[in-house]
């Protein structure tokens, strides 16, 4: 396969996730789910999104819509009724909304800790059988690390291969469909802040919708009918707070015990020793005060001349392994 376009390209432009166009032309029988394994990049590779980044728009509307409606409704009440009381309600609501959307954006646009694929092993090892697992020592505990067939590497401890992004990711927690991104080493603190802000915002809007309806109307049973906007907002937040609040509590439990969602479901560390547990305070310190490690991939670096060919070759070999050769059918 020869590369016809010799224009220099950056790594994000030849990243293996970007396979949809290539495959849809080259491979007519490919599983459609593969076509969505496309990492999205904006601002010349500075912003890294997951393949399902479009859900970020929905989440933004689900948070921004009710919050802005609440702020506008309260702003109208400032003119009509108790000026100071409603002004005091409005300011934290605006701040919480801005913080919540900022944390959502930071979680969604950051490289979560993508581990670059092992290109040398791709060309050199070929079909040589490597042991599936390897034992390594972590804090005095033996930890099994698995070989990833797609990335052609032994995953570092706590890393996992995200089936949606099609990458191995460091300290993988889970892939969040609401954020449209992996939640992992480099965006987990922002994700926890986002969840906490969302819970606070829900409680805040719920509480002050009810309080201001009571303040203004005085009688609870005519509230919903009289102030439909605040009534609907209170109901919306009452339903949402169980979901968002539950997730926040769960993640605080995970931080206290230094586990990822993935480990919690897979290993049940409660029943056996967790090699990463350091005590509640140290666990929080590690998450929120330690410097976030730099990314392993600089998507803005220039790709090497042959990189594009290697990537396309590797994708083709992956597809052959998964679906069989286009002419001879599945050989496995
Ligand atoms: Zn992998
Ligand atoms: Zn993912």
Image: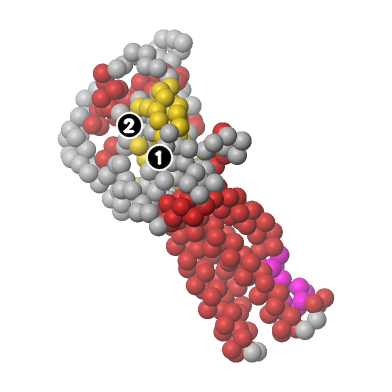
Q: Is residue 206 above or below residue 170?
A: below
Residue 261 painted magenta: no
Contact (CB < 8 A) between labels 2 and 1? no
At label 1, counting other C-alpha atoms closer than 10 Å, the crowd grade (few under 14, some 14-19, many 20 or more) is many
User: Is 248 or 227 nearer to us in this picture?
Assistant: 248
The boundaries of the magenta stretch are: 223-236
Residue sitting at the far right: 221
Q: Is residue 331 above or below residue 148?
A: above
Q: Secondary structure at mark 2?
A: loop
Query: Which secondary structure is most common in the magenta stretch?
Result: helix
Mark nearer the viewer, 2 or 1: 1
Residue 267 badge: none
- What is the quadrant of the N terminus in the image? top left
Instruction: Tell me residue 176's x, y (percent).
Output: 52, 46
For this view, does 115 lie left or right of residue 275? left
Q: Secondary structure at mark 1?
A: loop
Instruction: Tell me residue 171's x, y (percent).
Output: 43, 41
- The disc, 2 or 1, on the residue closer to the chain's N-terminal end is 2
Instruction: Tell me residue 218's x, y (percent).
Output: 77, 84
Report which quarter residue 4 is drawn in.
top left
Q: Is mark 2 within 8 Å of ligand 1?
A: yes
Residue 229 painted magenta: yes
CA distance for labels 2 and 1: 13 Å
Report which quarter residue 9 is drawn in.
top left
For this view, does 322 lie left or right of residue 209? left
Mark 1 = which residue? 170
Q: Residue at image x 59%, y 89%?
A: 84
User: Is 296 or 66 nearer to us in this picture?
Assistant: 296
At label 2, counting other C-alpha atoms closer than 10 Å, the crowd grade (few under 14, some 14-19, many 20 or more) is many
User: Is 48 or 43 nearer to us in this picture?
Assistant: 48
């Amino acid at each position: 396969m020869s590369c016809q376009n010799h224009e220099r390209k950056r790594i994000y432009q030849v990243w293996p996730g970007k396979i949809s166009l290539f495959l849809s032309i080259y491979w007519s029988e490919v599983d459609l789910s593969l076509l969505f394994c496309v990492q999205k990049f904006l601002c010349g590779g500075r912003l890294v999104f997951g393949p399902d980044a479009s859900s970020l728009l929905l989440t933004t509307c689900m948070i921004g819509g009710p919050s802005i409606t609440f702020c506008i409704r309260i702003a109208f009440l400032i003119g009509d009724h108790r000026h100071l009381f409603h002004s005091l309600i409005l300011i934290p609501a605006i701040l919480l909304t801005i913080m919540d959307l900022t944390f959502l954006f930071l979680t969604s646009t950051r490289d979560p800790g993508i581990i670059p694929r092992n290109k040398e092993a791709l060309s050199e090892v070929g079909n040589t059988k490597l042991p599936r697992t390897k034992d390594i020592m972590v804090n005095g505990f033996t930890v099994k690390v698995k070989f990833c067939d797609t990335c052609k590497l032994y995953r570092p401890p706590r890393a996992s291969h995200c089936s949606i992004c099609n990458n191995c990711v460091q300290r993988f927690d889970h892939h969040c469909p609401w954020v449209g991104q992996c939640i992992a080493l480099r965006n987990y603190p922002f994700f926890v802040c986002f969840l906490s802000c969302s819970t606070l915002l829900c409680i805040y809007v719920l509480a002050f919708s009810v309080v201001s309806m009571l303040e203004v109307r005085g009688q609870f049973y005519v509230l919903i009918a009289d102030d439909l906007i605040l009534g609907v907002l209170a109901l919306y937040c009452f339903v949402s707070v169980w979901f968002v609040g539950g997730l926040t509590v769960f993640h605080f439990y995970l931080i206290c015990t230094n586990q990822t969602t993935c480990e919690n479901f897979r290993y049940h560390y409660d029943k056996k020793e967790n090699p990463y547990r350091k005590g509640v305070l140290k666990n929080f310190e590690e998450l929120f005060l330690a410097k976030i490690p730099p990314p392993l991939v600089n998507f803005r670096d220039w790709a090497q001349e042959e990189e594009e060919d290697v990537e396309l070759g590797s994708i083709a070999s992956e597809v052959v392994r998964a679906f069989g050769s286009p002419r001879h059918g599945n050989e496995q």
